[in-house]
């Protein structure tokens, strides 16, 4: 039998109709085997932890929802939010200064980044915690005149919580400034030129045109920074700022249940970090507007997608028979 | 008020050691359409960008509507303008870029509304109505909610023209507006520009569209290696060029 294609070239041979073909998707046998192995290994690990008497699950259960722990959690949370806000606002300012033509602004901002990125965070936290030993009083006035507008004892002003906030916020500003700077530089210069040619001034151009586009590049690393910050707050336990870790240390300092208390801390840090990924995904979608990859798929869906499509194609095939 | 819209005398510009403009003399009267032609690297785009101060000139004089670009004359001195003053001058000069440069995070309508609302301080409702009218004028009334990435090159360029017109400029600058477009989309953009010219807009157009220059242009300026080689009525310059360099260029592009 001879058939003629629309191109006009005759084709010979027994060609079945196109819908008679069965499409066989690639079978990912390796994936199924590795999934079973991974689940078995994880189950074994969890089982051995559950049976381990040294873990004292009763202690974990007792302290997991204790009032002292919630007090610490509250401090950890507001410290994270406040330090990130301070870091981001100051960091954006530093980033804009570093991109400025003004040599004074550029010099000052570079010095700031150099100093706060170049010394360990732990050192900065202890430094702010003991700043009272450097200056006993804080005074605002006109030098050499004796005129004083404001005067206070450093230790009443710089409580452990304020010292922790300053240390974390200033350190974060140095890192955030580099992230924001990279984001700003990722925006095409044509955007700035277009804004300028419409009569927009540099500050307005930055706020309305450049920063919203830079956000797309800025948000993922900033999500990282936020998660990091949440965990970095544990360091302020060295100046007894009463965050989650400080309180955990207070407890195991008395009952010597170090491991169970660290499990309590880890569970809470993990829970908070998980919650934090939600706003990040939302922000990424918001600032992804107008780009092809704007509508992102949620990670959970992605995880399920592989096995689901495999199952679906199988059931469809069976239904077809 | 009788000053020409654009007046250049011996305009010079260099990038590092490379001299891009070697003394440009040019006058564009009100309502004229001036087409800048020439091979790439001849300095025509640089000169266009000097007109709205995206590039600073290094020598000579350049004025728009009687006012020196980037300077405020005071006695015998020219004071360099501050950013705020430069921005204020640019409001009256529309610019359309080769690569469109639409704001990708805003819809077509938001792109057109942005400057009237944020720069001119227009009321949002009024700006929206005017923006819609402008999009309608460039044939894109049904695309107002689309983001630039969802529009074709020709549509993006027409939105860019509407965006520039939203500030009610007295002068429009076009930097190779059709060079980044697929051939079948060029016509729509040129039609919009032709209508704009018919409405009496003063335009300076850097282009390789010889047909457009001949039909719409009032003045054709042929540039090469940073100088004006030949200028005048497009019908004469393009049909019977006097200079050998013009002839050589035209024989290549026609």
Image (cartoon, grey):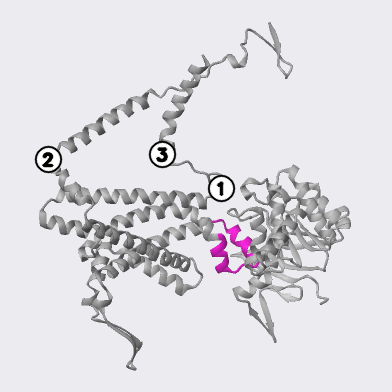
Badge 1 or badge 2: first in the primary sequence:
2
Q: Is residue B225 visible?
A: no
Measured in 3D between alpha carbons, the distance from the residue under mark 3 to the one under mark 1, in whole angstroms, is 22 Å
The residue that appears at 88% across and 54% down in the rendered structure is B240
Which secondary structure lies at badge 3?
helix
Q: Is residue A15 above or below residue B198?
A: above
The number of discs equals 3
Q: Is residue A68 visible?
A: yes
- Residue A243 falls inside the magenta stretch: no
Badge 3 or badge 1: first in the primary sequence:
1
Which secondary structure lies at badge 2?
helix
The residue that appears at 41% across and 69% down in the rendered structure is A109
Magenta segment boundaries in residue numbering: A187-209
SS majority, magenta: helix
Please say if the residues under marks 2 and 3 sit with CB atoms less than 8 Å apart. Answer: no
Marks 3 and 1: same chain? yes
Measured in 3D between alpha carbons, the distance from the residue under mark 2 to the one under mark 3, in whole angstroms, is 34 Å
Q: Chain of mark 2?
A: A
Q: Position of residue B251 (x, y in %)?
A: 81, 48
Q: Nearer the viewer, residue A31 or B50?
A: A31
Which secondary structure lies at badge 1?
loop
Eye-nearest disc, 1 or 2: 2
> What residue does disc 1 label?
A291
> What residue does disc 3 label?
A300
Measured in 3D between alpha carbons, the distance from the residue under mark 1 to the one under mark 2, in whole angstroms, is 54 Å
Q: Is residue A234 above or below residue B93?
A: above
- Residue A192 falls inside the magenta stretch: yes
**Position of the N terminus of chain A by quadrant:** top right
Eye-nearest disc, 3 or 1: 3
Numbered mark located on residue A53 in the image: 2
Numbered mark located on residue B109 in the image: none
Q: Chain of mark 1?
A: A
């Amino acid at each position: 039998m001879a058939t003629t294609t629309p191109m006009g070239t005759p084709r010979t041979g027994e060609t079945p109709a196109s819908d008679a073909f069965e499409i066989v998707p690639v079978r990912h046998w390796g994936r199924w085997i590795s999934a079973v192995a991974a689940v078995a290994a994880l189950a074994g690990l969890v089982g051995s932890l559950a049976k381990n008497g040294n873990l004292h699950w009763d202690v974990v259960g007792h302290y997991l929802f204790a009032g002292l722990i919630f007090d610490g959690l509250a401090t950890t949370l507001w410290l994270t939010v406040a330090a990130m806000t301070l870091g981001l606002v100051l960091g954006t300012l530093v980033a804009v200064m570093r991109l400025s033509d003004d040599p004074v602004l550029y010099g000052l901002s570079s010095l700031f980044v150099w100093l706060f990125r170049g010394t360990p965070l732990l050192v900065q936290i202890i430094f702010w915690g003991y700043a009272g030993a450097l200056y006993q009083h804080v005074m605002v006035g006109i030098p050499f005149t004796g005129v004083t507008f404001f005067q206070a004892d450093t230790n009443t002003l710089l409580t452990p919580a304020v010292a922790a906030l300053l240390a974390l916020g200033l350190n974060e500003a140095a890192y955030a400034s580099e992230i924001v700077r990279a984001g700003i530089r990722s925006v095409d210069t044509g955007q700035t030129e277009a804004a300028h040619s419409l009569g927009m001034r540099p500050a307005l151009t930055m706020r309305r045109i450049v920063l919203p586009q830079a956000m797309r590049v800025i948000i993922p690393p900033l999500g990282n920074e936020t998660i990091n910050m949440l965990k970095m707050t544990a360091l302020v336990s060295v100046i007894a700022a009463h965050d989650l870790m400080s309180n955990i240390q207070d407890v195991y300092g008395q009952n010597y249940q170090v491991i169970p208390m660290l499990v309590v801390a880890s569970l809470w840090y993990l829970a908070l970090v998980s919650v934090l990924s939600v706003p990040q995904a939302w922000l990424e979608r918001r600032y992804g507007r107008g780009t092809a990859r704007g509508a992102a798929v949620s990670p959970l869906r992605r995880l399920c997608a592989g096995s689901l499509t495999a199952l679906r194609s199988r059931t469809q095939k069976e239904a077809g028979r | 008020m009788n000053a020409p819209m654009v007046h250049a005398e011996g305009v010079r510009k260099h990038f590092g050691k490379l001299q891009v403009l070697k003394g440009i003399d040019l006058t564009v009267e009100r309502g004229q359409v001036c087409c800048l032609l020439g091979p790439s690297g001849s300095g025509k785009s640089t000169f266009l960008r000097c007109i709205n101060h995206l590039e600073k000139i290094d020598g000579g004089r350049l004025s728009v509507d009687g006012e020196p670009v980037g300077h405020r004359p005071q006695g015998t001195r020219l004071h360099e303008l501050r950013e705020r003053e430069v921005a204020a001058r640019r409001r009256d000069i529309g610019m359309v870029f080769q690569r469109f440069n639409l704001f990708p995070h805003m819809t077509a309508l938001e792109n057109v509304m942005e400057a009237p609302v944020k720069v001119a301080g227009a009321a949002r409702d009024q700006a929206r109505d005017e923006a819609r009218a402008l999009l309608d004028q460039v044939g894109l009334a049904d695309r107002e909610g689309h983001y630039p990435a969802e529009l074709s090159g020709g549509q993006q360029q027409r939105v860019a023209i509407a965006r520039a017109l939203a500030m009610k400029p007295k002068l429009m600058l076009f930097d190779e507006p059709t060079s980044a477009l697929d051939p079948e989309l060029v016509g729509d953009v040129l039609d919009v520009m032709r209508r704009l010219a018919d409405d009496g807009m003063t335009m300076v157009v850097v282009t390789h569209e010889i047909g457009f220059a001949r039909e719409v242009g009032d003045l054709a300026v042929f540039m090469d290696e940073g100088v004006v080689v030949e200028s005048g009525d497009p019908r004469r310059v393009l049909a019977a060029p006097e200079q050998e360099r013009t002839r050589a260029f035209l024989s290549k592009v026609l």
